Amino acid sequence: MVESADNLVLNNFTLKNSHTRNNVDSNQAETIYFNSSHRLIANNMNFISEQDTLLLKGYSWFYNTLVAGNVDFIWGYATAALFEESEIRTIGDSKYGSDVTSPGGYVLQARVQNADDPGFVFLNSDFTHGPGPLGTTVEAGSTYIARSGGNSSYYDNITLVNNTFGEHIAAVGWAYNGINGQPQPNPDPATANAGWREYGSMDSQGNALDLSARAGGYLLSETEVADYSTRASVFAGYNDGAGWEPQPLDAPVIIEEVTDKGFAGHNFDITGGAGGMVVTVDTGAKLTAALEEASNANTPVTIYVDGVITDANNDGSGRSIEIKDMDNVSIIGVADRGEFDGIGISIRRANNIIIQNLKIHHVLTGGKDAISIEGDDDGSTTSHIWIDHNELYSTLDVDKDFYDGLIDSKSGAKNITISYNYLHDHWKASLHGHTDDESSSNDRDRLITFHHNRFENIESRLPLFRFGYGHLYNNYYNNISSTGMNSRMGAELQIENNVFENTQNPIVSFYSAEIGYWNTSGNLFGSGVTWTTPSGSDVAAGPDATPTSSYEVPYTYTLDETSIVKSKVINHAGIGKIDQSDLDIPAIEDDNGGENGGGSNEGTDVTLPYSEDFSAADEDTFFSAAYKSLPDDSSMPLHNVTGGGSGIVVIAGQITLTSARFTIGDTLPETDTTDSDTTGRGVFDLSRPYKVLVDIVSVSDPDGDNNFQIYVDNNTSSSGKSWLGGSSKFYATLINELTIGTLEVEGPVASENSFIQLRTESGGTVTLDNFRIEYID
């Protein structure tokens, strides 16, 4: 219980009430009772119980947060409680027993004290379902969004705006006036200002829901929903109308050392290049030279990458970077700056190898694999390979065979661990064993561990596994369109505590001359999971995922509960997530043998007039220092994403922003500007009158209420968070009211060290070309 606290901030941890519901005891079991008329912020949190998970009063903001329970698990007397971009998960009710299906109960019960208080508001969130503590699942169509407390002295004020709902939610939505014996809500009927209200609801795939069967609620119009569409509007009444607009918090940097080395570290101390030569490189040629030097000297080598490796700055041969016929190698990215653009890594006849903290994408060199691992047909092995904390991707906007795999292995490659990687936007992700006809035992003895990886927007092969043994645990799958894990040719996979969302066929044995097997336990098949009917000899594990093998791995490891897997993986998988503070990383040697400190003083000329034609090959190039850099540090990019990066596309000399924002010339993009700043921290001299010009190519805003905005010396979405105050946002116009052609806007006089930010609000899209900043003479 929290009494009378104000501005309580909870960030990036889990509160769980482990009480298990039964038919004997009283089952009220909150994770938090906020008994205060003041403010609570829950950012990137998990609240897990079975009943009454959250009991709220006052003003609360839940952002990017999981709330799980099964009966009235969000309830109370809130003046205004906003749940934004969060997951509201109904779990199976333990009182019905273990491993059975139970009714879903009710998500909400509001007891709002004043008719005009916002009450409980849900914005851009997902209502999902999953198993309870005993494995109990939720029946389809059995969960109601809310029921009333049946008391005319308080109000059932709940508003739903642009949320998705899983199949567990009943078509009627609300438990209205007699449904399951529930009482009449207050008010009845609901109005635009009080009661149960709804706008823009979707199914779990993002398709608009047919709300004709809803009973007891009010469907808001586009005009009416404006009062519930932003933090500022929901919390406008705080402090006698002074208002409150809380902002998202960065997840704290919690360094979690990866101790589970899986098969790579089984009966082996995997050290990579430790104890040998150490060098930092920024080109492919320097990287190749360092590998050759270490190989010739037969010494371990650690190579730090601080820059963008390309085929062009290697030797232009179209070959991948080769770790071949050598052992004891580490290739590690520095911070988030180690990148392989269009070129991959080939590991062949090599042992004790670490590949860590690298972004590798759009690979067309060699066999077109981002990372290829193989032994040889002569019995040579490649073993004890650790692929950790990398980001690997291409695009789905090409034919499925345009690129090959992201992490593939074959021909005697074994004892491999693939951990904390982010694989996304690709067709065929991870193949292990390249043919059903492998006859050599060397080709069949593969041992591979996958743990804590994030797989998203991928068609298949996650992994495709022929022969051998695998261990897949605590991975997160989302938007997998064909198949996830595919066990083939007698392979046996131990599959534990993975989380699947919006995934077709999570675990199968498809397209194989002989089926493969699985020992499954504890996996969470969440919203949007579907199973197709197998054809011929194909086998799908679902929907019950019954084990077909008893295989268990021979090493020890730590298994996370599925309730925290999604948030843990999203927060820790990928690049820039490991602690390098205790590493002695040498400076880059220039071509003449001297150190350049990781960046030169020859950056982009930002003297006005300044222009940008968006001629980068793609958005990744556009946001790289290789394309344009800060004028005094060529290692730092001039352009930086500040929000909604997945909604930014650069192609054909134009940039498209959808629910996104980016800065031009901010020297501290990772630090939010504030109203306590004393001046700008950019690279443009905007200390005398100037104007911004940009060509509007196309616009789209289905909602009709989102703006295109231009800021100076402000990298947030809040106009007041700048030394310039509210004047930092000097242009804001409804997207649908923009005129195709050149937009010209005069900006407020700023400082000699200023920067610009462009933004489209949530749901809106604008395509731009030919951005300019010019003085007004």
Image (tube, rainbow, N blue to C red):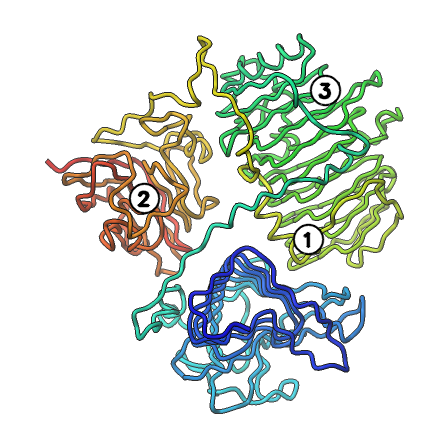
- Residue 776 can be seen in this image: yes
Residue 519, placed above or below residue 371: below
Distance from Cα at disc 1 to Cα at disc 3: 33 Å
Residue 443, image quadrant: top right
Three-letter residue code for mark 2? Gln
Give the number of the disc on residue 410.
none
Residue 619, image quadrant: top left
Residue 143, placed above or below residue 502: below
Three-letter residue code for mark 3? Arg
Distance from Cα at disc 1 to Cα at disc 2: 37 Å
Residue at 34%, 36% (x, y): give it.
667
Task: From the top left corner, tell me how far across and down residue 538 is, in percent.
Answer: 83, 46
Side (left or right) of 214 relative to 481: left
Sooner in the amino-acid sequence: mark 1 or mark 3: 3
| SS assignment at label 1 | strand
Density class for disc 1 (Cα within 10 Å; few <14, some 14-19, many ≥20) is many
Give the number of the disc on residue 499.
1
Residue at 85%, 30% (x, y): give it.
445
Q: Which residue is mark 2?
A: 757
Q: Which residue is mark 3?
A: 348
Side (left or right) of 125 relative to 221: right
